[in-house]
Image: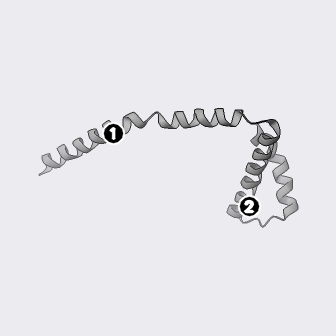
Amino acid sequence: MVITMKYILLFIKKTLRFVLKPLSFLPAIFVMYMIFRLSAQDGVTSSQLSLKVSHKIVVTADKILDKELSEAQIEHYVDRIHYYVRN
């Protein structure tokens, strides 16, 4: 019984490797697509997108850390991290 279970697990492992190995390049393809897509934006569109991302980071951090920041404080922190998100 123990030997049979060993062979079953080995079969499952080999089957999963056989099925998933051809798909292992998909994350790299996705990253390449995102780099291509985002680099095709003009400066204004890219800046607006990174400002939205900066705002989302600050709001999410505010919720997680339970700081209850005012809107002015949120905008202050958004301005502070926007450069780093943009680059």
Residue ID at (22%, 42%): 11
Kindly state the secondary structure of the residue where label 1 is placed. helix
- The image's mark for residue 19 is 1
Position of residue 22 measured from the top left corner of the image (x, y, whole percent)? 38, 34
Give the left or right position of residue 4, taking residue 47 as reference. left
- The image's mark for residue 43 is none
Which circle's residue, 2 or 1, is located before the other in the chain?
A: 1
Kindly state the secondary structure of the residue where label 2 is placed. helix
Position of residue 2 measured from the top left corner of the image (x, y, whole percent)? 14, 50
Position of residue 32 measured from the top left corner of the image (x, y, whole percent)? 59, 32
Disc 2: which residue: 62
Residue ID at (85%, 49%): 79
Report the Cα–Cα distance between label 2 and label 1. Answer: 42 Å
Residue ID at (59%, 35%): 33
Q: Nearer the viewer, residue 23 or 17?
A: 23
Give the quadrant of the C terminus. top right
